[in-house]
Amino acid sequence: MTTSAVRATEHTVDVAAPADQVYALIEDVGGWPEVFPPTVHAECVERTGNAEVIRLWATANGTAKTWTSRREHDPERRSITFRQERSQHPVGGMGGEWVVEPVSATACRVRLLHDFFAATDDPADLDWISRAVDRNSGSELAALKTRAELGGPDQLITFEDSVTVDGSAKDVYDFLNEAQRWAERLPHVARVELTEDTPGLQTLEMDTSTKDGSAHTTRSVRVCSPHRAIVYKQHVLPALMTLHTGRWLIEERAGAGVSVTSRHTVRINTERVHEVLGQDADVRTARELVQKALSGNSTVTLLAAKAFAEGAAGGRTGP
């Protein structure tokens, strides 16, 4: 690698919100899926003082990727430097810095800097990385601005449904993980396309229907942790939502069996409520409709997973 193979970029955005408030959103990596569109899942692996190791699952140019990074926090300067510890092809290495600069008591400027190089000498790989950095940086800064400047209440709701299964965590997980078979196993799923180029990192596209007869196509990226959990984020959404993340959680119960939970976090698209539901509808109506539809489909899936794991008639279809 030569220095000429390293590219550096800077993206900025002006935010009408206090610098400390904006810095807190950047610092809280666990909340990134609810703020930044490309981020599917994020977690802190370890932290000592102002140094931490994080793992991210996100999309880049429409492709699902995962990597680990080391971050150094400087709260006084309101900056966070980062460097990927384990990059994913075609990235050879990447680092950068978030800097939040106060402009006034109620406004700031956010600078997002990157430096990177490709894993190969192919110029096309470096161009691919550049496009991904430009696209994700623009998307992230715009989303950060929107979230920080939010004047009214955040239309974010979280709800869940659970069942108890007299069976193994492995069988429940297998049913949820093998989403490519859901069109055969679930009445509300008409079509499924699932790809898994990286083990445990899936892209899932589905055509589903609700009890009122409406149908929609969704596209999600799923992070699968065998026998414990599947975390996902939808990137193609129904009209009434601007955000939908979810989790399938499988927990061993004391004694025997497992508890299986479907948890949804949704942000309502307030600008399209009247367009989709009519002039008499309000945000509360949209919230209730979305929750009813998602809970209904989740409950059907949970009960099907229960039947599969317990070996009930019409459930288990394989050894």
Image (cartoon, helix red, strand yellow):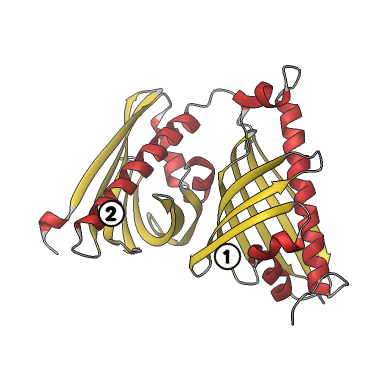
For marks 2 and 1, give the one nearer the viewer: 1
- Image location (x, y in percent) of residue 103: 31, 24
- Tell me which residue sits at (74%, 63%) in the image: 184
Closer to us: 67 or 62: 62
- Tell me which residue sits at (80%, 54%) in the image: 299
State the quadrant of the N terminus.
Answer: bottom left
Closer to us: 11 or 31: 11
Q: Secondary structure at mark 2?
A: strand
- Image location (x, y in percent) of residue 301: 76, 58
Q: What mark, if any, has residue 284 been given in the picture?
A: none
Name, please, the residue furthest toward the bottom.
319
Task: Give the spatial CA distance, label 2 vs label 1.
Answer: 26 Å
- Image location (x, y in percent) of residue 37: 48, 43
Q: Which residue is mark 1?
A: 224
Residue density around tag 1, few if under 14, some if 14–19, many if 20 or more, within 10 Å:
many
Sequence-first tag of 2 and 1: 2
Name, please, the residue furthest toward the top.
279
Amino acid tagged 2: Gly
Residue 26 appears in the figure: yes
On screen, 301 above or below 105?
below
In the image, taking residue 301 as reference, residue 135 lies left or right, namely left
- Image location (x, y in percent) of residue 189: 72, 53
- Tell me which residue sits at (57%, 61%) in the image: 194
The quarter holding residue 227 reads: bottom right
Closer to us: 220 or 153: 220
Amino acid tagged 1: Cys
Closer to us: 252 or 179: 179
Q: Which residue is mark 2?
A: 95
State the quadrant of the C terminus.
Answer: bottom right
In the image, taking residue 99 as reference, residue 204 lies left or right, namely right
